[in-house]
Image (cartoon, rainbow, N blue to C red):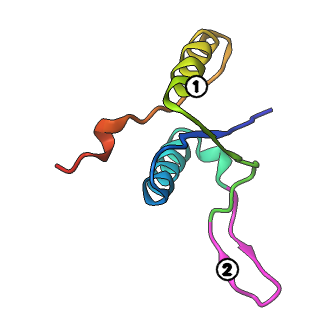
């Protein structure tokens, strides 16, 4: 069974929260292409590509909570827990 949640810094502005979620989702899709479903059609016949096959809630925390969660998650990686991180450096312009 695969479970997934995004945990994002609640102090970020909304645009950066959306950007962080998009970056994490793209990385997850690359790492776990099996989580990207087939195209589906809605009742109007419109096609929607790559709808996820699992629920991915977005949770919020402060910087301290994120660090604690990262430490706790890292201790579980050997038992199969995967973790994708993103830090402030990813927000800086090149």
Please give the name of the residue rendered at 67% of the width and 39% of the height, measured from the top-left corner. 5
Q: Quadrant of residue 60?
A: top right
> Between 19 and 48, which is closer to the camera in this rendering?
19
Residue 58 in picture, x, y percent from top left: 66, 47
Residue 79 in picture, x, y percent from top left: 68, 12
Left or right of 94 on screen, residue 83: right
> Between 76 and 30, which is closer to the camera in this rendering?
76
Which segment is the magenta one?
37-49
Q: Name the residue beneath numbered marker 2.
A: 47
Helix or strand or loop: what does disc 2 sit on?
A: strand
Whether 60 is drawn above or below 42: the answer is above
Quadrant in which the N terminus is drawn: top right
Residue 73 in picture, x, y percent from top left: 61, 18
> Between 27 and 85, which is closer to the camera in this rendering?
85
> Between 6 and 27, which is closer to the camera in this rendering?
6
Which residue is most to the bottom? 44
Q: Name the residue beneath numbered marker 1.
A: 65
Left or right of 28 on screen, residue 5: right
Residue neighbourhood size for the residue with mark 2, other residues' Cα within 10 Å, grouped as few (<14), some (14–19), many (≥20): few
Left or right of 53 on screen, residue 92: left
Magenta residue check for 74:
no
Residue 10 in picture, x, y percent from top left: 55, 43
Q: Quadrant of residue 41?
A: bottom right
Instruction: Tell me how far mark 2 sits from mark 1, CA to CA.
Output: 39 Å
């Amino acid at each position: 069974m695969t479970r997934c949640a995004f945990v994002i810094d609640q102090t970020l502005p909304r645009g950066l929260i959306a950007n962080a979620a998009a970056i994490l989702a793209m990385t997850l899709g690359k790492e776990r292409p099996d989580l990207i479903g087939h195209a589906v059609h809605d009742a109007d016949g419109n096609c929607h590509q790559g709808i996820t096959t699992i629920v991915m809630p977005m949770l919020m925390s402060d910087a301290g909570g994120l660090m604690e969660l990262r430490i706790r998650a890292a201790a579980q990686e050997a038992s199969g827990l995967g973790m994708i991180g993103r830090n402030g450096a990813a927000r800086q312009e090149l």
